[in-house]
Amino acid sequence: MELHDVLRVAGIGLLIAMLHLFFESTGKKEFAFFLFFVGYIYMTIELLRLLKVFFYEISTFLEWLLMTS
């Protein structure tokens, strides 16, 4: 996981939060809910991608440990 991954997720999260607040304050609650839903799906996909990378790194480390013993 690199810094630009964290910054991308944080930037998109902030953008979605600001748009959500804007739509809530203007009375367009349907748009705000849809934006929240899209943001939730995006964050879930990113989390799954990062978990895949994490578990790949763990399995590589464990294979290295088995080879050295």
Image (cartoon, grey):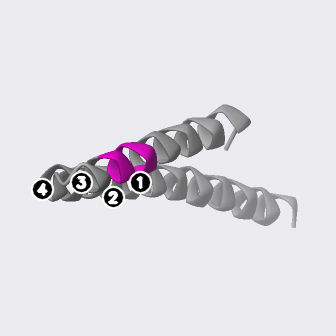
* Residue wearing tag 2: 40
Is residue 65 shown above or below 4? below
Left or right: residue 47 compared with residue 59: left
Q: Main secondary structure of the magenta part?
A: helix
Contact? badges 3 and 4 (CB < 8 Å): yes
Residue type at mark 2 is: Tyr
Residue type at mark 1 is: Met
Mark-to-mark CA distance, 2 and 1? 5 Å
* Residue wearing tag 1: 43
Contact? badges 2 and 1 (CB < 8 Å): yes
Residue type at mark 3 is: Ala
Q: Position of residue 26 (x, y in %)?
A: 24, 48
Instruction: Please tell me which of labels 3 and 2 falls first in the chain.
Output: 3
Q: Nearer the viewer, mark 3 or mark 2?
A: 3
Residue at x 53%, y 52% (from the top left corner) = 50
Q: Nearer the viewer, mark 1 or mark 3?
A: 3
* Residue wearing tag 3: 32
* Residue wearing tag 4: 30
Contact? badges 1 and 4 (CB < 8 Å): no
- The magenta-colored residue range is 17-22
Q: Position of residue 51 (x, y in %)?
A: 52, 59
Q: Nearer the viewer, mark 1 or mark 4?
A: 4
Q: Position of residue 69 (x, y in %)?
A: 87, 67
Instruction: Please tell me which of labels 1 and 3 falls first in the chain.
Output: 3
Left or right: residue 34 compared with residue 13: left
